[in-house]
Image (cartoon, grey):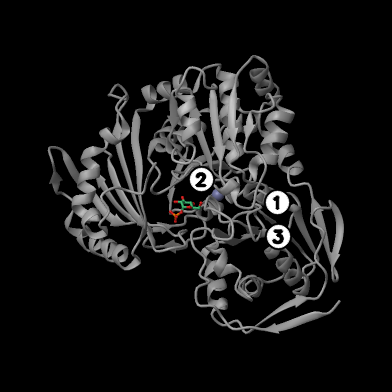
Amino acid sequence: MTILTIKTVPFADQKPGTSGLRKRVSVYSQPNYVENFVQSIFDSLEGFDGKTLVIGGDGRYYNDVAIQKAIRIAAANGFGKVLVGQNGLLSTPAASHVIRHHKAFGGLVLSASHNPGGPEGDFGIKYNIGNGGPAPERITDAVFARTKQIDSYKTNDAPDVALDQIGLHRSGGMVVEVIDPVADYAALMQTLFDFPAIRALFASGFTMTFDAMHAVTGPYAHAILEGLLGAPKGTVINGTPSPDFGNGHPDPNLVYCKDMYDLLMTPEGPDFGAASDGDGDRNLIIGKNRFVTPSDSLALLAANAHLAPGYKAGIAGIARSMPTSAAADRVAEKLGIEMHETPTGWKFFGNLLDAGRVTICGEESAGTGSNHVREKDGLWAVLLWLNILAVRKQGVDEIVREHWAIYGRNYYTRHDYEEVDAAVAGKLVDELRAQLPSLPGKTFGDDLQIAYADDFTYHDPVDGSTSAKQGIRIGFTDGSRIVLRLSGTGTVGATLRLYLERYEAAGGRHDLETQLALEPLIALADELAGIKQRTGRLEPSVIT
Ligand code: G1P
Ligand code: ZN
């Protein structure tokens, strides 16, 4: 086996976004594209000689090719060992756990999350550090800088590793251990949740559908829900990972899980419905006749976490991304614990979790998680919900309504305008930003008075770093908010995200249809930002 140094030239477009470098497969499959990026990651790290690297992905098209390349580059760069999930599979939260559990130096997570897969779809690579979480900006910035300079990468001429065979293999001088992707994760879940209580719930006739969306959570859900928890066979649907996600879009929202939603709204449907995305970090929660928004789910899970053994001592604090509704803030206030508002993206939660300042985190984009790993975790959220249902012996709808009766309701929606011309979107944001200083104090309609208007800047209380320009916030005196930002995960054009929120206190009307309840804010957002007129779009592409 020989270590080879191969000459290369930089690619100009390898800037990691909200969650790693996501590009079309056609971009990733250019000669040296993966190699340049992986070598640039390793060039930006120090002290990994002889250490362990975890590699796993969501099984999407190109995973197998990219993993073999990454293994060779890791071997040639001096890693001592690679831990890789069988067939290259590891859900993102499982990868985070494997990094932590095996005290690895870091890991490569190969996924484009909920984006479609297949030859025409997307692919992605993300580097996670030793705490199991996404690399902080200090590292991703260094990686990007390196991608612009790189002139060679190291690899070897070893044959492909047989990733279907669990056990020890080699790539040159480096050990490659192929592991069961589910085992460590399933063991962790059993330390957090009351499995006997959930098993008893299923035994009592409680019914559930879990849609794995032909993606990575299939094997995890089969093993945990139908295996350890005794849910009937057939509870998990679309449970076999496929490279193109069954030609679907593995995004667990009301658009792509509409059939399940419709079923949950009928008397014949199951008691509970859930789904997870391509790489297993997002979740969708639907009870009978009740969709739970991710923002509400965060608040509810935080308020009820003590019912699960892993959190019985209570939670230290809660963090949410800025665009996520303030429902969780009210829970934190009642519990007398810390509440943090961070920029979009899970990487900002890592420091707070490491410092023990928060236990539960969430984003409006269907991401919820806790200090058990350093990624959001779809199945974790589903299991915590099941644990709560088993202990409270109430349905989802009843639990949600009781929550609103205590804390009030934050009506909430997100409108996405996808694949908008990048220049048009950039100008729209710039011009809205320019208006911000003049907005506070202005009143619109009968009662919408602007209390503040800014471009969110985050000051990390743990490491003191600052992240500016994280999205435009327009806050009103009644607690309503309009938030607008550009997506950092899109692969084509720009995606404009508009987030709207209105608070209705305990005792108020909690049964309005969401879009209706938010109508005045939706209209005002368009008036201020000129979205329809500038983009030429009359409707958002997706409403969640
Ligand atoms: C989106 C979500 C964000 C999430 C990220 C990765 O990022 O909005 O909450 O952390 O995907 O799953 P965005 O495209 O908005 O930058
Ligand atoms: Zn994901």
What residue is shown at x 49% (from left), y 26% (from top)? Answer: 263
Q: Position of residue 506 (x, y in %)?
A: 32, 24
What residue is shown at x 28% (from left), y 56% (from top)? Answer: 454
Q: Position of residue 293 (x, y in %)?
A: 43, 35
Q: Are marks 3 and 1 in contact (CB under 8 Å)?
A: no
Location of the N terminus (image quadrant) = bottom right
**Residue 529 vs residue 342: left or right?**
left
Mark 2 is surrounded, within 10 Å at the Cα level, by few (under 14), some (14 to 19) or many (20 or more) other residues, namely many
Residues 316 and 302: in front is 302
Badge 2 marks a residue whose secondary structure is loop
**Residue 208 vs residue 453: left or right?**
right
**Which is nearer the N-term, disc 3 or disc 1?**
3
Badge 1 marks a residue whose secondary structure is strand
What residue is shown at x 28% (from left), y 24% (from top)? Answer: 509
Please tell me whether residue 515 is drawn above or below residue 422 in the rendered image. Answer: above
Please tell me whether residue 152 is drawn above or below residue 534 in the rendered image. Answer: below
Q: Position of residue 372 (x, y in %)?
A: 64, 43
Q: Quadrant of residue 21?
A: bottom right
Mark 2: amino acid = Asp
| Label ID, residue 64 | 3
CA gap between label 1 and label 2 equals: 18 Å
Residues 337 and 526: in front is 526
Q: Position of residue 190 (x, y in %)?
A: 71, 33
| Label ID, residue 89 | 1
CA gap between label 3 and label 1 equals: 9 Å
Please tell me whether residue 231 is drawn above or below residue 68 in the rendered image. Answer: above
Location of the C terminus (image quadrant) = top left
What residue is shown at x 59% (from left), y 83% (from top)? Answer: 9
| Label ID, residue 251 | 2
